[in-house]
Image (cartoon, rainbow, N blue to C red):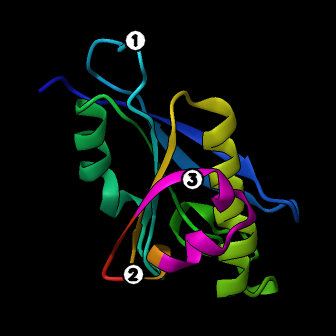
Amino acid sequence: MTQTTSTPARLRARDGFVLAARHFAPTTAPQARPAGAVVIAPATGVKATYYRRYAEFLAGHGFHAVTSDYRAVRESREPFAVARQARWADWRALDADAVLGWARTHLPGPLLTVGHSYGGFGIGLADEARHVARHVAVGG
């Protein structure tokens, strides 16, 4: 399998909060019809790096894959994170919305999602979820 590299991205949520994300580009030959862009929605408090191998697997099979950290988690922590309270409602309405919007506007093919635990249902409540063609929930 071809080595997959990821590109960091900084995404801005509607409230101005900056989120850390990574884009894993397909490692297979370009297809006439793109396989799609898969946003991996994490479980509560789980770091995006946990999903790296799955994102690499998807990229190796022709998909664009996007991982991200919710606010107050790993790379999306502000220096003064205590000043902002992270809530599930923010992860759904602001964070998931920002990641889905970025994937929809920057990556080709249908928008797909895979959600783990909270990510399995929380991402479906984001405004941008109306653009999702297919969704898989794992342990959600």
Q: Which residue occupies 39% across, 81% down?
A: 117
The numbered mark, 3 or 1, whose residue comes first in the sequence reads 1
The kind of residue on which mark 2 rests is Ser
- For disc 3, the marked residue is 132
Choose mark 2 or mark 1, whichever is in front. Answer: 1
**Where residue 133 appears, x then y in whole percent?**
52, 50
Q: Quadrant of residue 47?
A: bottom left
The kind of residue on which mark 3 rests is Val
Q: Which residue occupies 32% across, 46% down?
A: 55
Q: Is 62 left, or right, of 102 in this rendering?
A: left
- For disc 1, the marked residue is 32
Helix, strand or loop status at disc 2: loop
**Where residue 125 appears, x then y in whole percent?**
65, 75
Give the magenta range: 121-135
**Where residue 122 appears, x then y in whole percent?**
57, 77
Q: In which quarter of the image is residue 102?
A: top right
